[in-house]
Image (cartoon, helix red, strand yellow):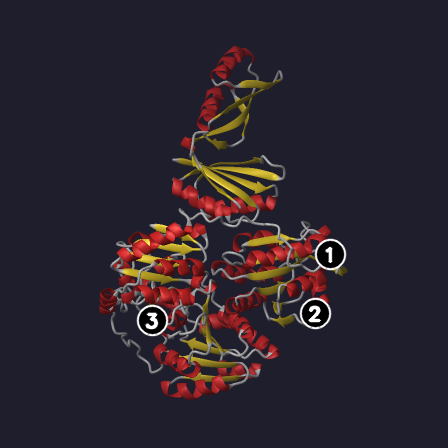
Amino acid sequence: MAQAVSILLNQELLALERAVGELRRRNLPIESITVGPGEAPGTSCLTVILSTDEAGADMTAKKLNKLSGVREVKHFPLDDGVAREVALIKLGATEQHHAELLDVCELFKATVVDETPDAVIVQVAGTGSFVLAFIRALERFGILEVARSGSVALPRVSADAGAATPAP
Amino acid sequence: MTEVLTGAQILCRVLLEEGVEVIWGYPGGAIMPFYHALPDHPRLRHVLVRHEQAAAHAADGYARASGRIGVCVATSGPGATNLVTGLATAHMDSSPVVAITGQVARPMIGRDAFQETDVIGITLPITKHNCLVRDVTELAQRAREAIAVAREGRPGPVLLDVPKDVQNQRASYEPAGPESVLRRVRSVPSPLSPRPLAEAVAEAARLIAAAERPLLMVGHGVILGDAYEAVRRLAERTGIPVITTLLGISAFPESHPLHLGMPGMHGEVHVNRAIQHADLIVGIGLRFDDRVTGNTTGFAPRAKIVHVDLDVSEIGKNVPTTLGIVGDAHQVVTELLAAVAPRDCIAWLEEIHSYARPRQERYRGDLSPEHIIAAIHDVTRDRCTIVTDVGQHQMWVAKLYPYQRPNTHITSGGLGTMGFAVPAAMGVQLARPHGPVWAISGDGGFQMNLQEIATMVQEKIPVKMAVFNNGYLGMVRQWQQFFHGRRYSATPIWSPDYVKLAEAYGIAGWRVERASELEAVLAQAAAEPGPALVEFVIEQEANVFPMIPPGATLSEPIEAEPVATAGD
């Protein structure tokens, strides 16, 4: 089962490089990796989805927790959390299929965020497989370009989901 | 008192603050301001090595023998990259080495300047922490942090990269007061013991009381944590036999009736069988390395494992653990000692001894490793520190030298770095100026760093060097013999005339070809006031037995040469 590992880092490339290097060295199957600003100023949050078991995620978290610049590492099975990604998809001229496109968008709760006579950009958010399904559904409209964010994740609110390894 | 100093002067001051007495290094363009400041700080003894790799190994040897940090210094580019093997060695064996490298001036960074290299990027995976100092105003703080990180918790190497213009910049320097609080640069592993320490210790004591076939497995953590006495008392109170890993050798006196020996790939048959028959293994300060466990799926199949380690990320990494206890070896073992009930394991110890096979002299020549190591022990007794290299001689020494005193066996374990012994022994010698230090190498490893004899001569470092010369890269040749149909590809190795080599360096040298010559030559070598070199010409195809083949379990030792088959 997939595991989410979320790593709060100092906002510096060296800390990011250390964390990513550790993941590479441990030779773990990475499904998704993404980095964005952390909650506190001066921090980044690296979110990794790993195809491993809970013990593998736990060992990874412990190794990551030793690194310079790593502040906190959390991990949880994806089933005990919520993971979402955003994708932007640029399509070619869709004038004759416009209504059809809007139907598909509505089905996937996607929105058109940019429109010119030559192209349309639509935005979708959801789990990785949901986003992939949407992209497949758009293939017949002629995809020009896709940008995917990778997954961010949070453990569910319910009690004792996820184990935190906070730094003192 | 605040003074205005250059970055280079600040670096020297911080090293002195931290009690550093010796630094190992090699000057060059980007580190010249530091070398300019050095003569003004005569309490910092600088040893000029002949290759930066030796500086890192010497700092490592110094750190392991002294329990303090070892410092090495190199210039940018090739100087820094030459440190890499030494840093990786220190990283694998948890040794607190502090490396200071010069870097090109800040305006040149990123422009592929002369002798520029991204040493921070290069050493990222082989240091515990590293840092590029961006301004002189942060230099003292970064240097103090680097030293603190190297020492704290599980020790390890750190690297401080200091641009040349930062070394020349001036800033006010304030000596570190006792109240100076270090910024936390890394999250110290929190005590993530599955349970609180007292509870875990009580559980361990219960497991020990219930076990019929318990073993203590003792590793480097016992030496780093200065837990010899506590471990010895624990063993004596419970009667549990003690196994010492390669880096745990000398953590427990070998003459002790409870001492069994080294486990793993070249462990004695009875030691590995004890592991396979044990119902409880209490591992203290070791990481269950693959050379110790063999194939982990068949490792200690009947045993519950209690693993005591300072580093939470080691527990459960290689072998499944019944109980993990995170903590310093000394602290945990002391508490465990108070919690265990006295018992003995007499029947179990007898059973283990019944597994033992008498050592078979398979040696065809006259000068066997057994003879040589016994003779070295005769001349050094228990007063010396032995530093070994990597390969067959390393295993022979580990198995045959009867270590009695704590931390008198130093070797490259985790990384298995050939060329380690000679430079590391220089560091050991300066940490223990009054004790004899022997560097034992094979003819392969010795030739990797023999240039350091010049350093020993120039700096009057009286290391005694022993070279086991079999004309082969012996351990690789042994694998070729056992597993590659005797195809001795690239393992025959020619050596120079070592007696003449010694003469060229102006030191005493001998060649020993017969057992009858051992006593006299070793006595003379030991009596030499300066460095000395003794070559032992041994049988070319001597092997280390027993051997667990790679991928096999500890139950499957090879105890004799495989019979050559057609096609070999």
Tell me the SS state at disc 1. helix
What amino acid is labelled 2 in the image?
Answer: His
Q: Position of residue B297 (x, y in %)?
A: 30, 51
Residue A141 seen in the figure:
yes
What amino acid is labelled 3 in the image?
Answer: Asn
Q: How far apart are marks 2 and 3 (CA)?
A: 50 Å
Crowdedness near tag 1: few (<14), some (14–19) or many (≥20) residues, C-alpha within 10 Å: many
Q: Which of marks 1 and 3 is nearer the N terminus?
A: 1
Question: In the image shown, does B495 or B503 lie closer to the viewer?
Answer: B503
Q: Which chain carries label 2?
A: B
Q: Residue B41 has which mark?
A: 2
Look at the numbered discs 2 and 1 and tell me whether their residues touch, using CB distance below 8 Å: no
Q: In this view, does A52 lie above or below B375?
A: above
Left or right of residue B357: residue B230: right
Q: Which of marks 2 and 1 is nearer the N terminus?
A: 2
Q: Distance between the residues labelled 2 and 1?
A: 21 Å
Question: In the image shown, does A103 or B398 lie closer to the viewer?
Answer: B398
Crowdedness near tag 2: few (<14), some (14–19) or many (≥20) residues, C-alpha within 10 Å: few
Tell me the SS state at disc 3. loop
Q: Mark 3 lies on which chain?
A: B
Q: Residue B165 has which mark?
A: 1
Q: Where is residue B289 in the image (x, y as percent from the top left)?
A: 39, 57
Provide the residue designation for mark 3: B543
Q: Where is residue B553 in the image (x, y as percent from the top left)?
A: 29, 57
Q: Which of marks 2 and 3 is nearer the N terminus?
A: 2
The image quarter in which residue B343 lies:
bottom left
Q: Residue at x 33, y 65 (%)?
A: B237
